[in-house]
Structures are given as structure tokens and as C-alpha cells.
Amino acid sequence: MKKLLTTIFCLLLITSLQAGNTLKRTPSVAIIPQPVRMTVGDEVFTLRAATPICLIAEASELVYAAELLNRTLAPVLGGELPISNVRREKGILLSLSPAMRPEAYELKVAPRGVTVTAGSPAGAFYACQTLLQLCPADLTAAAGAGAVQIPCVEIEDAPAFDLRGMMLDVARHFFTVGEVKELLDLLAMHKINTFHWHLTDDQGWRIEIKKYPELTRTGSYRPYTTVKRTLTPDNTPHAGYYTRDEVREIVTYAARRFITIIPEIEVPGHAMAALASYPWLGCKGEGYAVWCRWGISKDVYCAGKETTFEFLEEVLDEVMDLFPSEYIHIGGDECPKDRWKECPQCQARMKAEGLADEKELQSYTMRRVERFVRSRGRKIIGWDEIYEGGLSNTATVMSRYGNQRTGEVIARGNTVIMCPAQHCYFDYYQDDDYDREPVAHRSLLPIEQAYQLNPREDFTESQLKQILGVECNLWTEYVPDFSHAQYMLLPRLDAFSDAAWSLAPRDYENFRCRVAVMFKRYDTMGYRYATHIFQQQ
């Protein structure tokens, strides 16, 4: 009953509060992420199958925005909207303005039509995402209705950060090509423009490398997985990897949604799947197996062997051939130094290079891999640990340890992507009643805490120039399937989207009301989500 009353209250509230404007008669308008400025009028525009989409620009990518509208609206309208390059008096007009920021847009809905002006095709695509959220929340359930009424609004919008990312770990649990595409659609709906794809770890290698076929023949398979937090095997084999053609297919799919994919190949730790495939990559040279449990393995790439660096360079060459992204993520986190301390070749490397300790050996390894990546015209990202033992001034740090560490990295002159775990790690529990929740990482991140993310807090305008953006992460030790992944993401992804995009004032109660409408969209789209936002005292 409490959930029902809260939902009814929210639906009533959003009809009277529209970005600070109180009107006598206002349609329900609830948009995530919240636009920077929005004014809602009293009238509506009726969209029908005959309404043309007019692309008034030379950019061929504008058609992606038109495709988005047709994919969503065609089942409702009974056919696709005609696409034209001729300006029409009544219709949906998409145009570009070089004076605007690339992802910025202006959206005007009037009784006679819709006008979108954007700084780039990406901005036009985001304007169309907003336009779809102006449609009835149960839109996809209204197949064959023949018409859609859209409230008249004027919106000016632009993102707070250029990079708005989400990381999916497919090494611990594999997700199919179709599921990855479905996730990309969900990210696009939330105006998230970067997909960080964690492809390798101790528990699995998920990307085909032509020169090293054992990486997927051996490294993509584990015979069982330990149950929950015990060492009890579930006796269920787990396997899967993406072929080169499938990777290209997904990269193209993402690009048509203005999402850049950043691949992650872990170096020098989290390497058991690679060591099991090619034992000569490790310090011991034998006795490795793909890990079937969670945690941190002491077995890592041997930093003393030249063959290790030859392997990494050849793997990264193939990875960079598949991914056109400016950045390549090379991990760098949670690398125990035990094997290096025992390894004669690693100790000889340290002596030859004048390295004081094993932390500096890790820094040497990361710098050397970075030099190779930069020689191919790309840049690297690494987790916080690449900060230890010395840091190249051209590396970008993905910081999960909060604002203090971010400030330290900025002070060194490096760029940062923020993903503070207390706000952005969506593998954490959403409620402290752990017995009622699906098994998760034993930390707590309720929806209120996710919404409290404020990446601009504590930093000056000058420091913010070194923050490339923000990212939320879903590690999958305890997320065995896509339905579970949806539950962990939603609605915390809505909270993250608001923080990453919107410069509008933070208002949690307003956010709860917008999420109430978003849930209706998720219902009609078949998504699974958590309802904790309406279970609060």
C-alpha cells in the first residue's frame, strides 16, 4: 500500500512541477536524465504514421536518430515515419548548429510539429531519446494505436561530462551478443556514451585472438563456479567468448547509438585465464588453471620475460584492430607481488632497470605497455593502482577510491575518470536485508546513495578540466545472467545517468517521481528492476 500511495503521489506531483514551472494544466513529463532547462506548455502535438522526419543537414549520421524513432514508434503507429531531406511545414525537423556543444540540443514541441537543433548527430540522437520519454510511458504496449500525443515543451540540454560510462564484467559471467546489444540500448536511453567492456580476468578470457587460439579454447572455459561465498562447486561448466566478427558487430551496433566501446585487457594481474592457456607467461611456467572461484590470484604475468611483452603487444595489436576507441583500458589493479619477489627473471629485470621494489616493477610494466599503445596512436586507462610506483603523465586513471585520490591524481597532472565505489559499484547490495536480496558483493549501495553522486563536488573549474567523466560499474561474480544484471542496474542506472548528464539542481524527491514513470516504461519493455526506491521509511 505504501508503495502504491507513493507512486500515486509522484504521478500527481510531476503534473504540477516541471523544472520549477507550476502550470494550471500540465501533462505528465518525467525525463531521465533531467534536462538542464525545460518549459512545459498546455497543448499537444499528435504524431501519426504520415508525420515526416526531415533531416536538414549533410551529416549522414543524423539518420541514426530517425532510425531510433522508427524502431520505437513504428509498432504503435502502424508503420515507419517517412524520412526526407526536404523541409516540411509540419513534422519532425532535425538540424545541426556548429555553434552548439557537440552533444547539446534544443527540442521544441509545438502543436504543428517538432524542431530539434543539435551540436552534432549525437545531440540529435539524445534529443530523440528525450522525445520518446515525452511519449506515454506505456508506449510499447500501445501497438496499433495509430497516433501518439506528445506534450508541447521547450528544452535546452547539454551534458555535464563528455564521458558518461558503464562497465560490464563479462569475464566472471559471460553475456551473449544479444544481451550486450540490449544493454547498449538501455545505455543509449540514458544518454550514456561509453561502454567499458571488461573482457579478461582470472575466471575467463572472452575475446578471440587469432595469434593465440588457446586463449579462447582453454581460457574461456571453467568446469564449475564456487557457490556464493563458499568453495563448494556448482558442477556447472561456464564458457563463452566473442569472435572477431561478433566484436565488430557489437562495435558497429554501439556506434549507431553514439556509444564508444573501450575494451579492457587486464595487465599484469587477474591473468589466470591467460596463464592457463599459455603457462610460459607466468613466473612458475606451469600448474595454472582458469580460476573457478573469486578473489585475487598470486599468479600474474611474469614481468621479467621478454616473451610476456611480445605476447601483450600482439594481443593488444589485435584488440586495437577491432576497437577504434581513442582509449584502451589495460587494468593494473590488484596485482600481488609474491611471484615477482620469488622470480629470478623479475629480480634481474628490477636490477637491470634500477627499480627499487616490485611496485616500481609494476609501474615499469604499465609504462612499457603504454608506450606500445601510444605508438599505435591510442591512449591508456588504468585503475587506481597504476598510481603506485610512479605514473606516466599521459595515462588516465580510473579512480574508484573517492575524491581524495582523484585530487591527488589531478595534482600530478593526469586525467581522471571517476567511478567512486560508494556511489558507482552496482554489484553491491541495494538493501541491508541481505536474506531477501539476490546474493551480491557484501557492501551496501542503496538508491539514495547512488543518487548522491556529485562528480563536481570538491573540485575547482580548473580541476574539472582534468576529469574526463564518470562511470558506473557492474562486476559479475554474483550476477550469473542478464535478468539479474538488469535488477542490479535499475534504477541505480537512472540515478547515475542524472548525475553524469544533468547540471540541474539535485532533488531526490523529484527523482523518485520521475523513476515512478520510468518503471512503467521498464514494465512495457520487459526489464527487471528493483523497487527499493519505494520501500524507504
Image (cartoon, grey):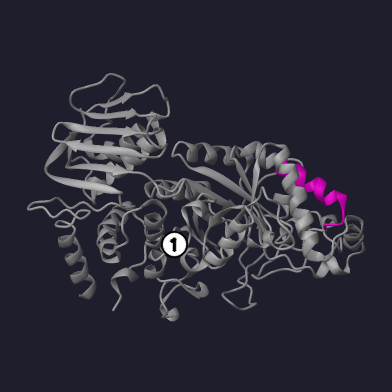
Q: Could you tell whether 188 is left or right of 233 in the image? A: left
Q: Nearer the viewer, residue 536 or 287?
A: 536
What residue appears at the point 92 percent right and 63 percent down from the top-left corner? 344
**Would you identify the image quadrant in which residue 121 lies?**
top left
Q: Is residue 107 above or below residue 223?
A: above
186 horizontally vs 466: left or right: left
**Position of the C terminus by quadrant:** bottom left
Say if residue 358 shows up in the picture.
Answer: yes
For this rendering, which residue is in front, 334 or 63? 334
Magenta region, main secondary structure: helix
Is residue 481 shown in magenta?
no
Q: Is residue 298 left or right of residue 155?
A: right
The residue at 25%/57% (across/down) is 517
Foreground residue among 458 and 430: 458
User: Who's the residue at 40% across and 62% down the image?
Assistant: 492
Spot occupied by residue 49 in the image (x, y as percentages of width and height): 21, 31
Residue 309 forms part of the magenta stretch: yes
- Is residue 276 among the parts visible in the rendering? no
- Residue at the spot of label 1: 457
Q: Position of residue 345 (x, y in %)?
A: 91, 60
Q: Residues within 10 Å of mark 1 (few under 14, many from 20)?
A: few
**The residue positioned farthest toward the left in the image shown:** 24
Q: What is the magenta range?
A: 303-317
Residue 394 against residue 267 in the figure, above or below: above
Task: Point out residue 186 in the picture as x, y percentages from the top left corner.
Answer: 40, 50
Q: Indicate the position of residue 421 as horizontal and vertical percent values.
A: 52, 66
* Residue at (72, 65) in percent of width and height: 335
